[in-house]
Amino acid sequence: VELRYRRCNTVVLSVWVGYREPIIDAWLSESLQQLNTVKKIGVPIRSGFSYKIVIYGLTGDCPAIKLATKHVNHQGYWCCWFCYTKGIHEDKKRQYYFENKLSLRSSFEYFYYSKEVQRTNTNIFGHLSVSPFTTVFDVPLPRSLIIDYMHVSLLRHTKTVIQYLYKNYLKPRERNELDERFRTQSFPHFFNRKMRPVKEFSYCKATGLRNMLLYGLLPLIRPFVPVPVAAHLSLYVTSMRLLHGPRKLGSDTELVANQLISIYYKDHPLFYKKIQNYVLHLHCHLADQYYLHGSLSNLGVFGQESFLGYFSRGRSGTRNLGQIILNNYHVDFTLYNQSQQISNN
């Protein structure tokens, strides 16, 4: 994971700099053609061998996957990429309540409905057209889609739940005490980032929320909330801890985690009002993701988000931002490669 997240190992195929969403086919058509060419001829190395490339899947936040797959956004009625759960419109929001049995989308149905939408120009179960990535993926949709737990679980659901508890269950004095506990909580040096108070959540990073969810939230907030609320929250924390690491329970790890998430999701309206949104629904599919792709600690886009931040810092001035950013990135890339060659020689 550390090697994959290094900036020098991140390949930039194309960059979109603008104030609105791109036309995905026009933007990525050339890059996808180049990917197909590289897949056919392979990547030769100095020793004479040639490596074959396998395009395994796609990950990102919900707006990015929606754009790449040509699916309705997370505010639509059929926005789930994996099942046919339909949202309910309540108070100007789409709510996705718990269902005992999910009707999953098969690869054949996904491809068929995408083709049918392209022919009829209508919305069928959330499909808007055929994804351009189908030409390069070696794993069919929707199996090749990987939920980014950094955005779904940490930056969205965990943050929403903590703020809801902070606002609706804690008194002002208790809020100050909880904030002080978060701020002064000690961690080993290799955690790299401490927890922030809830009142400073606008500055909180995903790594801080991860430490809060997996380690600090439950023991620190327990004295301030009722026992049923803490017990319900423990279901979510325990399930995420199971899915975040190796198989602590062997082959039953994802099964137990899925049972905990199902109970948490089913009872969620009892403790939280009007936040049964799409990201909560996506947690129903995390057990399948764990079985197919591995633990959540290997699936986040922490490295890619860090790279985007570094990439965007190349901006200067107010005009031609795209060209300036790319030029500065090329300069940094060239200087890094030259230093590597000098050190090797």
Image (cartoon, rainbow, N blue to C red):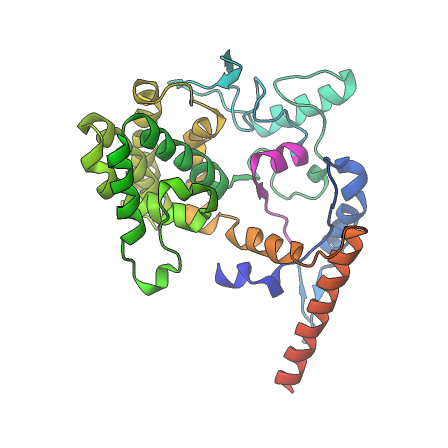
Number of marks in the rendered image: 0
Q: Is residue 86 visible?
A: no
- Identified at 70% across, 44% down, the residue is 136
Residue 69 lies, with reference to residue 292, above or below; the image says above
Q: Which residue is nearer to you in this view: 103 or 4?
A: 4
Left/right placement of residue 28 relative to residue 170 reads right
Q: Is residue 167 visible?
A: yes
Quadrant, the C terminus: bottom right
Quadrant in which residue 38 is drawn: bottom right
Q: Position of residue 46 (x, y in %)?
A: 70, 75
Q: Position of residue 9 (x, y in %)?
A: 61, 63
Q: Residue furthest bottom?
A: 345
Residue 134 lies, with reference to residue 3, above or below; the image says above
Q: Which residue is nearer to you in this view: 241 or 170?
A: 170
Quadrant in which residue 224 is drawn: top left
Left/right placement of residue 273 relative to residue 217 reads right
Quadrant in which residue 228 is drawn: top left
Residue 306 drawn in magenta: no
Residue 116 lies, with reference to residue 70, above or below; the image says above
Q: Which stretch did the figure color magenta? A: 53-68
Q: Position of residue 55 (x, y in %)?
A: 63, 48
Q: Position of residue 313 (x, y in %)?
A: 65, 57
- Identified at 66% across, 73% down, the residue is 336
Q: Which residue is nearer to you in this view: 240 or 158?
A: 158
Q: Which residue is nearer to you in this view: 324 or 107?
A: 324
- Identified at 42% across, 23% down, the residue is 275
Left/right placement of residue 141 relative to residue 94 reads right
